[in-house]
Amino acid sequence: MKNYYVLFIIAAVAIVSSCSPKVVVPFVETNKVYKHQTDSVVEVIQRELPAALLDSVGQPIASEWVGTVNFNLRKPNYVILHYTAQDSLAQTLKTFTLVKPQVSAHYVVGKDGKVVHMLNDYLRAWHAGVSKWGSISDMNSCSIGIEIDNNGREPFNDIQVKSLLALLAQLKKVYNIPTANFIGHQDIAPGRKPDPGPLFPWKLLADKGFGYWPEYLLVPAPDNFDYATALRLIGYDTTNLTNAIVAFKRHFIQTDETPAMTQLDLNVLYNVYRKY
């Protein structure tokens, strides 16, 4: 009788389990892929191989591996801000967990203020693409990419911006990122990317120590002010000067994106340029 009771309980549990809805945990499979790929990165780091070199006549050059005791991880030195150009946080997470788009970011900030960390800060995300800032032509290798859930046609809400500021404060402190090195995708890829766009609150960020903004009382630009050189010294790629002007105005003027430099634009540029 006792054995019969035990069998009855087991059968009842099995029936209930089979009838219960299965709990679907999102991104389980993509998290497995992430784990596999980070394991591959660790494997590369652990290789201890001497340099395989040949001289000018094809003969091997003597070499060996001797591990130094003085090293650490390379750290990011820039933060690049983007808008997602999509309609929801869920859509962006799906995009960043598919292979085909070939895009990613370290963080995504949702409209509700939720911050999703998608890649270890020391690893290289694919967010900057073809870009240039100053002499750096591979921004992916030295930056953290932050995507903000915004379709590019709407204001960034207060809750979202509050979370972004908290994230930026943490990154600046942990990695000692200079104030000047908080910039937008539009700044490093003028003519190709418009984000985070003229609705982004750059002044508020600058007030908190993330990027620069001109003073309220502008010092007039001198008559011989070379705005092309000033843009280049800030960091803009001036190979196409028109694109660089538009990118600058999206960031620092925001009410006008025309490629012509007015006297106000020159004054703003002069005041920003003097901070670099």
Image: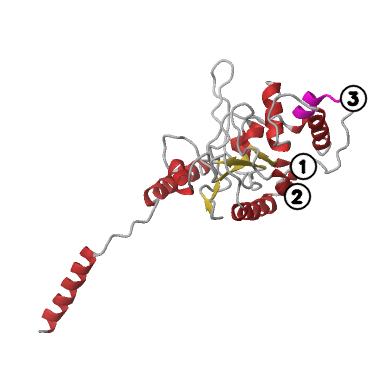
> Residue at horizontal 62%, vertical 54%?
158
Crowd band around label 1 with a 10 angstrom C-alpha radius: few (<14), some (14–19), many (20+): many
Q: Which numbered tag is attached to residue 223?
A: 3
Q: Nearer the viewer, residue 235 or 71?
A: 235
The numbered mark, 2 or 3, whose residue comes first in the sequence reads 2
Crowd band around label 3 with a 10 angstrom C-alpha radius: few (<14), some (14–19), many (20+): few
Which span is picked out in magenta? 223-232
Quadrant assignment for the N terminus = bottom left
Q: Is residue 226 magenta?
A: yes
Residue at mark 2: 207
Residue at mark 1: 213
Q: CA distance from mark 1 to mark 2?
A: 8 Å
Identify which amino acid the numbered label 2 is placed on: Asp
Q: CA distance from mark 1 to mark 3?
A: 22 Å
Instruction: Examine the rendered structure and indicate whether residue 275 appears above or below residue 115.
Output: above
Identify which amino acid the numbered label 1 is placed on: Trp
Question: In terms of secondary structure, where does tag 2 sit?
Answer: helix
